[in-house]
Amino acid sequence: MNQPPLLSRPELVRGVRRRSSWKDWELYMMLIPGALFFILFRYFPMWGIIISFQDYNPFGGIWKSEWVGLRHFAALLQYDGFWRIFRNSIVLSMLNLIFFFPMPIILALMLNEVRKRAFKNTIQSIIYMPHFISWVVVAGITYLLLGTQGGIVNEFIVKVGGEPVNFLTSNEWFRTLIVSQSIWKEAGWGTIIFLAALSGVDPQLYEAAVVDGANRWRQIWHITLPAIRSTILIMLILRLGHILDNGFEQIFLMLSATTYEVGDVFETYVYREGLVGGNYSYTTAVGLFKSVVGLIMVMAANRLAKRFGEEGVY
């Protein structure tokens, strides 16, 4: 009887690795759509940032456009309104960090305390719904509610003897409206990540806390919040990466000539210069500047988190 040839140890290791590599080939196949998405829509468009160092000519393309080095970045820093749009972008982002960022956490904690599943699912569906409404509709609702001509809120103020308030054209109210709209539209949707993190908390921890006499507040403080602390920190770091991003559509729909001083941000400036003015290279340089600032913020926050013993995002 013929015996199969004995394999050496390196050959056996290679064989085992080859078999284990193809063992989960179905999972690797599931990676393909996601990988293609990121290659086509995230990495491949990065090639376009080259034009921020050129005087881009649409007829000549990237290969025949003149190289100008850092001229567009210098022009951005020398722009008279640079510090106005920089200040407005930072202030709106900080207001969102202070008032909007904690709201999904608070909502998730409140939903986690609801014991009746049907009631919890109903509340979740209600707070998710605004996410699917476009900013155009949100702006329309805002105008219907707060307009000085026929706005429901102002009609009520007049009926109780007050004077109409210019919510929509006042510098004092612009940022409040923007942050309020963001909270109403996106806070409920933002609870998904924190609810997922809360689902991973071991129920035995709560049972042990109850045996020790801890009430609901102490359970939240000593068990729930520490359990989702790393998730909160990661979301905060990622949020800091968009410190100069305020979203074009919402700001553009709410912006007017009277709120220009507090509402003009990088997105609306890029719209005017890039799409309206045709300065593609200059506005690409503006976008690259924002990305570099966001990258610096993420790296600094991640390093600070690691210094305090947290994992960070990388």
Image: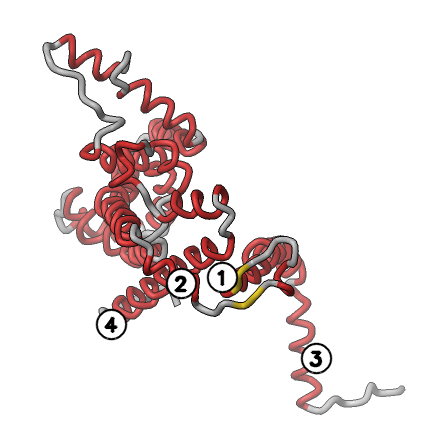
- Residue pictured at 29% horizontal, 40% vertical: 263
Q: Determine which residue is flagged by label 4.
A: 307
Estimate the x, y position of residue 99 in percent, counting from the top left.
Answer: 22, 42
What SS does tag 1 mark?
helix
Q: Which quarter of the rendered picture does the C terminus lie within?
A: bottom left
Q: Which mark is residue 52?
A: 1
**Mark 4–mark 1 distance (CA, rounded to whole Å):** 36 Å
Residue 49, given in percent of the width and then of the height, sits at 52, 61
**Dot 3 and dot 1 residues touching (CB under 8 Å):** no
The CA span between labels 3 and 1 is 50 Å
Of circles 4 and 1, which is in front?
1
Q: Are marks 3 and 4 in contact (CB under 8 Å)?
A: no
- First of labels 1, 2 by sequence position: 1
Q: Residue at x 36, y 42 (%)?
A: 190
Residue assigned mark 2: 73
How busy is the neighbourhood of tag 4: few (under 14 within 10 Å), some, or many (20 plus)? Answer: few
Q: Nearer the viewer, mark 3 or mark 1?
A: 1
Disc 2 crowd rating (10 Å Cα; few below 14, some 14-19, many 20+) is many
Secondary structure of residue under mark 3 = helix
Real-space CA distance between mark 2 and mark 4, rounded to the nearest whole angstrom: 33 Å
Circles 4, 1 touching at the beta carbon (< 8 Å) = no
Q: Nearer the viewer, residue 269 or 140?
A: 269
State if disc 3 and disc 2 touch (CB < 8 Å). Answer: no
Residue type highlighted by circle 1: Ser
Q: Amino acid at mark 4?
A: Arg
User: What color scheme is it?
Assistant: secondary structure
The residue to which callout 3 is attached is 15
Left or right of residue 209, residue 116 in this image: right
* CB atoms of marks 1 and 2 within 8 Å: yes
Closer to the N terminus: mark 4 or mark 1?
Answer: 1
